[in-house]
Image (tube, rainbow, N blue to C red):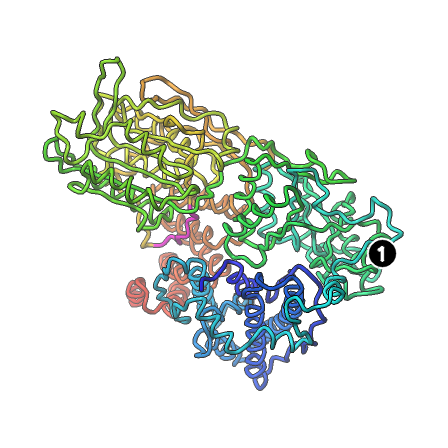
Amino acid sequence: MKFSPVQIGAALAAAGALGLGMMFFGRSTAPAPAPVAPPVAATPASSSAALDVAMRELLANYRKIIVLLDGDSALPAAHREQTTRIGQALFHDSQARSAALESTLAALIGSNQASRFNTINGLLDFIESDSGLYDADRLAFRELLQGLLANVARDSSLPAIKVHKRISEDLDALTEIERNYDKEIRQIFGRYEQRGIELKRERWDAYLAHLKKIYSRDAILKEYGVVLAYPGKAEPEAEAETASEAAAPAPSPAKPEQGEIFGAALPPKTVVLTFDDGPHKRYSEEIAAILKQYGVPAVFFNVGMNLGTVGADGKATLGSGAAISRKLRAAGHVLANHSYSHAQLSRQSGDKLRAEIVNTDILLKAVDSDRSPLFRFPYGARNREGLDALASAHLRSVMWNIDSLDWADPVPSSIADRVLRSVDKEGRGIILFHDIHARAVKALPAILDRLIADGYQFAGWDGTAFKVGKAGAEPAAKVLPSTGYANSWAIVIGVDEYPKWPKLQHAVRDAKGVRTSLIEKFGFAPERVVTLENAAATRSGILAAFHDQLAHGVQKNDRIFVFFAGHGATRHLSSGRDLGYIVPYDSDPEQFATDAIPMTEIQNIAESLNAKHVLFVMDACYSGLGLTRGGGASAYLRDNAKRVGRQMLTAGGADQLVSDGGPNGHSIFTWTLLQGLAGKGDLNGDGLITATELAAYVAPAVAGVSNQTPAFGSLPGSEGGDFVFELPAETEFLSVQTAQLSNDAIAMNVKLDAVRPEPAKADEKAAPVAAAPVTIKDLQGKEQTVVTPQAVPSSMRQQAQRANDRGLQLFKEKQYAEAETEFTEALKLRPDFALAANNLGFVFFKQARYKEAARWFENTVKMDPSRAVAYRNLGDAQALAGEPAKAKAAYETFLALAPTSNGAAYVKQALDKL
């Protein structure tokens, strides 16, 4: 049996639901959850036993939800309704239990009891190594561990720091477990060597089989007073009754303009984007940044308690979440009411019901005096009294007809596919997302790419109805391409040892360098990177790589990167035009017209490949590729997701020799290419490097330091698509072990930077600025102007990460003043950014500014108290600043956290010198 994303989502969402104010199921209301005991007093006698009971109760609910969901799509509609109702009851019970457990743990940690960390370590022992737990069971405790991590971080004692480190490692292991189930179909499970959780490599179907020995759907339902009738035997009236509460009719006195709003009433090919449960301190702004890129509006249904509180006098006191909602409103989006506590309002009545509605309305008015009259019932659970209460408050209920299931499905591509299939089926609608999930952020660009490409319009609220053209801060023409690739493939070829052509010195090394970059930096799977070196790169070997190894595995949403380092040749045809060739290992110079590979054949291969985007990069010089004009205005980027792209970048033209002399044994062209892929090619600072940007960086840089004139363009048959690399976030904490570039590499980069295009910079207070157009050659020797994509806005968290990444790059080039500026910018954007704080400190350290360095390393360990490398850096800085006692304490903390690490011997030697 194969698992489905929704089945996996059941487990992962159950884990994520424990402690989040969100809906686990969304089709109906649920019976009232069983009462939950208040938090247990944190005493030595009671904590361990009470925690053990609470943990096992959470696990039981988590498992029951998985069993209920498994295969429920095959059940009759009435049976699905019943299982959903009980699933909701389990979900709400888990929420309450989780809140009580978190409160107990917070009190325990803050109690300063000598035994408190023994109790916490016992809890971690259970999660890590209890013999009755499967890997998937451990995901039930993910949110609990995240809360523990935050609470433990407030304690600076050594035992607390060790526990913090242990929890961090366990969370890393849970991420690995989640990744395993996400990719189970490939049966890939990387070895995880951290202490604590030892991964068991269990299959999902084995886990389900284990759960079904413990629970059955019928037994769980019976526990809640439900027995399912045989399919087809239920009375029609009984079936109708199960859905009546969720589908309560509008109250009779409501005016038409106060009636509920449903997605089916929208015009054809029109959608409304809605986001529930926020504002969220991280994801709401990231979603808003994406929406701004695409120029589309949305409605954010806020939970009142996330905005602030309302006193007995009816006055609002706003919290930190209100600032996020104000930013959403300033960006042109609509704020709407999602109740105060996300309670099931169909189970509320009287003053409690009205308070859930009115208190959030008061808070929204404090955030935005022109708040919208829109309201969404949590879980869609509404009844006649609730709708009457809305009418009295002059609010309108907004439902949805397209559910992304982003609360349950952990796979962003699966979320996107589900939404797009539903939109195709409905033809219009109100789409339900939640702005409290990272996976919703990841899925959104792919959804918007496709909807825009298919001609859908996005409606915003104009005060009376949903209409197209109301909100959205930027024209859709300024949208950047989303990577949106399913799989990434590459063919990497390097030939030095030609039998009959002059031997080369750098080609194989260049190919190895490109392969390493694709795999280690951009996540290409090693098994999908076909590498041919020297004798393996024959004519038949190269063609077989395309026709045999790629032809049957590549899908339409994949990308293919092709790199060739070797000889190129040009043949002048009788028609007067030139034809270029790449020269395989077994070619003869006397007959290369028949045994080399003409570019016309490469073009035919490119058109036959079933991939979205293909990029050829040729570190060889020749002419005659017949390329079309490269680059173009930024308007074409909007449709990048649907447009096929076939592009090529070459090292030079006919009669030009490829220049050796690049650092680390590379050619100048490949060294420059690798620097571009390392981040210098991101000319607009958005974290993406398009083929157009890469060419705009590489071509003038190489031409400025050599006698080569690189060329770039689109192959015939290309529809304007642009190949995209997404830069990964750098996570290295600088230390004495950080490698910097050699002097010759730094000298070469200085030359390259002197002729590179000026990067664009986005300013939150001003319109984005485009990078200057770049003039480069096509392969016919004609000049063309390449217009790079326009800089776009992004969240402050994303901007902080990019500033840190630039700082790391500058540090490795020993540009310390510039690196200091970037790390400082990262901290201005994100004051709690421990990575940037450490790196800023190390910039000071390298300049012998030891006291300043120590202050920033101290800041780092306050932000992330279990970061061992920061204690080593702190010890070094304090030792050199003349504070041996402080240095000793820092070194000893490092050894307590990382006694067997690579740096342990270094620190022991440093201690001996104090």
Magenta stretch: dominant secondary structure: loop
The front one of 198 and 706 is 198
The front one of 248 and 119 is 248
Estimate the x, y position of residue 684 in percent, counting from the top left. 47, 34
Give the residue furthest to the front.
Answer: 233
Is 503 one of the magenta-colored residues? no
Secondary element at tag 1: helix
Q: Is residue 347 left or right of residue 794?
A: right
Q: Give the residue type that dot 1 points to.
A: Asp
Magenta region, residue range: 728-735
Q: Is residue 349 left or right of residue 514?
A: right
Query: What is the tally of numbered marks visible in this picture?
Result: 1
**Depicted 775 relative to depicted 146: above or below:** above
Q: Residues within 10 Å of mark 1 (few under 14, many from 20)?
A: some
Kindly indicate the quadrant of the structure image that contains residue 785: top left
Q: Is residue 556 left or right of residue 907?
A: right
Task: Give the residue at mark 1.
Answer: 388
Give the residue furthest to the bottom.
Answer: 45
Kindly indicate the quadrant of the structure image that contains residue 628: top left
Is 729 one of the magenta-colored residues? yes
Estimate the x, y position of residue 229 in percent, counting from the top left. 66, 71
**What residue do we see at 60% from left, 79% from top?**
42
The front one of 677 and 735 is 677
The front one of 119 and 474 is 474
**Depicted 326 relative to depicted 590: above or below:** below
Res. 806 in view: no
Say which quadrant the N terminus sits in: bottom left
Estimate the x, y position of residue 587 in percent, counting from the top left. 15, 32
**What residue do we see at 56% from left, 36% from top?**
454
Estimate the x, y position of residue 561 in percent, counting from the top left. 34, 39
